[in-house]
Image: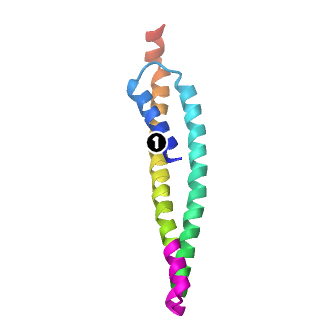
Amino acid sequence: MKKRILDYRKRIDALLAQGADRDWNRVLEEHLTQIAFFQHERLIHLIVTVTFAVLTMLSACFLLLTQEIALCLLTLLLLVLLIPYIAHYYTLENEVQRMYAQYDEILKRISAAQTPANSSAQS
């Protein structure tokens, strides 16, 4: 998923950098669909990350209360799993935020293409 979101964002960045005449409405429609997919992925990973964080904290609290070696292993295992989940969620969150900025830029392109000055210049 990380590679997919990074590749997609870079592809849209390249389209915006080219600034060529495009069907920006079509680009916007696709972009909104992709944002929705990545928002869903972000929500799922948020739920999983928070669940692992809560389980890690509960395990650590029980470890402090009981000092059982098995709980030490469980806490360590949960912590080892929690760190990659946080890193992945961080990537999803930041990339979706960047996609919002791209969305705003695409809207500017559509608005610029629909101004009366551009319409008369194209006629």
- On the image, the x and y values in percent for residue 17 come to 38, 28
Q: Closest to the observer: 45 or 74?
A: 74
Q: Is residue 4 above or below residue 49?
A: above
As helix, strand or loop, the secondary structure at mark 1 comes to helix
Residue 64 shown in magenta: yes
Q: Residue at x 48, y 32 (%)?
A: 106
- Write down the region rendered in magenta: 63-77
* Residue 14 visible in this rendered orientation of the protein: yes
The residue pinned by badge 1 equals 6
Residue at image x 45%, y 24%?
112
Q: Position of residue 108 (x, y in %)?
A: 45, 31
> Where, by quadrant of the figure, is residue 36 drawn?
top right
State whether residue 58 is above or below residue 78.
below
Front residue of 4 and 34: 4
Is 12 contained in the magenta span? no
The x, y position of residue 117, in whole percent, is: 43, 16
